Every structure is written in C-alpha cells, then in structure tokens.
Amino acid sequence: MSVKGKPKKESRYHVRNRNRERYDLDALLTSNPVLANYLMPNRKGVNSVDLSNPDAVKVFNQSILNHYYGITNWSFPEGYLCPSVPLSADYVHHIADLLCEHNFGKIPTGNKITFYDIGIGACCIFPIIGVVDYEWNFIGSDIDGKVIESASNIVESNTALKGKIACKLQANPKDAFYGIIDKEEKIDLSICSYLTEEGGTKFITNMLRESKKFAQNFYWFSILVSNPIMANNIRMALGRFKPTQIKTIPMGTGTKTSQIVAWTFLSKEEQKAWKISRWNKKQA
C-alpha cells in the first residue's frame, strides 16, 4: 500500500473518513519523523511505508492519528493488535449514519451520547475516532488488565480524550454486558469488532443472549464481522430473541467487504421517547 499517489478506484471508504483520499506523506513525516525509518521505494520508485513490518504499521498509525486526529500520545505494548485506522473509522462513520437514519437525518453528537465498545483493545481506536469526530462518550471493556491499562494511559495522556472514555475490566470473559453496564444505565449503541478474532462463536452467542437482557438499556447493538457466513448466522441466531429490527450494513474498503449487523429491541414508541430524551435535547 503506497501512502503517496491516488487511491485505487475500488476504494470505498466512507465519505466522512479522514483517510478516504491519499495520505499526505510529507505531513505524516512532520507529525512523526520516526516514520522516515520505515519508508522504502515501491515499484515506481515512490516512497511508501513498508506495511509488511509490524513496527512500521504501528508507527504509520501513530502518524495518521497525530496528523489527522490530533492524538499526540498513542502507544501500547508489543504483542497487541494494531488495527487499520481508516478501517476502524469506517465502522464508526457507518454507525453514525445508522443513528442519523433514526434521528430525522441528523447525527446525534456531543456529550449526551454514549457508546459501549466491547473489547476496547490496547490501542483504544474506536473511542478515539468517536470522540474526535463526533464528541461522543465511550465506555470500553476488556478481559485483559494490560489492555485496560494501555487504553487508560492513552486516554489520560491526550487532553481531547480525558473524561470522555471510561475503561473497565471485564472480570468474566463469558460476559459482554454483565459486570460493566448498570441496570439503569442508558447506552445509545454498542460496538464490537470481530474482524480478526477466531473461535469467537460462543462469545457472540452469549453477547446476543445478553443483549436481550439489556434490551431497555440500549437503542442499538452492533457487531462488525468480515465473514458473510458469520453475519448470516448472527441474523439467524437473533431471530430467537425477537428484536424489533435487524439491519445489515455493508462496509466496503478496497476489495474487501465486511458487514455490520445491528439490532434493537425497542418498540417504535420507545424509540421515539429515546430520541426525545437523549438525542434532541440541547447538549450541556
């Protein structure tokens, strides 16, 4: 992948994705001069990032977050996943559109809106994008204490994120919502990415079952998967719990297409009351 030159024609990043167009390599180098250590000429002799090198991927993402999102301190321990910033951003933008569709064509933004990230990851990537682009609040959970420590350090070391993201340790690896979300808590949407996970079928089944128990706490639940068979299985499994609506959102990036499966248990009357009480009040 070259960071200089026009994007491929088949690129289908979301229209609000900050990296929809070509990267400004000079600007990235200014933001993070260390990136220069990971450049190499491509077949056309143009400098590009060596994305076969995991260290280069991490530094590249650091540079993107610094230049395009204003995140000056972003680091996490070795051995943890370093996701693509543009791909992660697409998930965030598509779920913003989902809320927009249910809010009279206006994306709910600001500190009244709260999201729950199941498996926040050591890099805290989804909350970063949601906070910077939409000023949302986030709760993030993970079963790994080192992940929570890393994500918390990122939050505390960036002024834009402080007070906007709560990182919580999930004590029971089988649970998605229990132990994290209070009975009276209201969350506008949950997110969970299973693009790179393996053997997660049992956890997903538990998450679907638990979502029914938390039906009144959330407007939307969602999960991102790369396997269309898994997406179909999720839709079929959800039928047992009788959500009022299931929505599948294609998320295309380049030649790869993932799917977001979203569902809600709220009736039309409950949805209307939710929008009035949370999305259409003046932000504090």
Image (cartoon, rainbow, N blue to C red):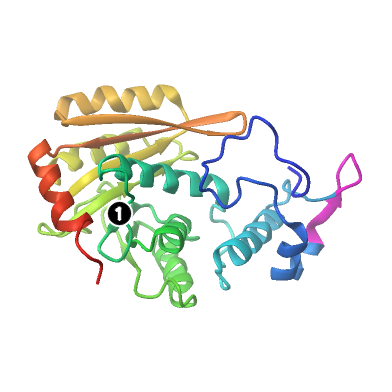
Q: What's the residue at 66%, 63% (across, down)?
A: 63
Q: What's the residue at 31%, 64% (across, down)?
A: 168
The answer to whether residue 6 is left or right of residue 91 is right
User: Which corner quadrant holds the C terminus?
Assistant: bottom left
Q: Residue 98: which quarter of the image?
A: top left
Q: Residue 241: which quarter of the image?
A: top left
**Residue 217 seen in the figure:** no
Q: What's the residue at 30%, 39% (across, down)?
A: 101
Q: Which residues are magenta?
A: 37-46
The answer to whether residue 276 is left or right of residue 165 is left
Residue placed most toward the observer, 89 or 197: 89
User: Which corner quadrant holds the N terminus?
Assistant: top right
Q: Is residue 202 above or below residue 45?
A: above
Q: What's the residue at 41%, 22% (across, down)?
A: 229
Residue 173 placed where, x, y %?
A: 30, 50
Residue 247 placed where, x, y %?
A: 30, 30
Asked whether 177 falls inside the magenta stretch, the response is: no
Name the amino acid, label 1. Answer: Pro
Residue situated furthest right in the rendering: 45
Residue 95 placed where, x, y %?
A: 37, 44
The answer to whether residue 82 is left or right of residue 281 is right
Residue situated furthest left in the rendering: 269
Q: Is residue 194 above or below residue 147?
A: above
Task: Please give the residue where the numbered disc 1 appears in the rendered image.
Answer: 108
Q: Secondary structure at mark 1?
A: loop
Residue 142 placed where, x, y %?
A: 36, 57
Asked whether 45 falls inside the magenta stretch, the response is: yes
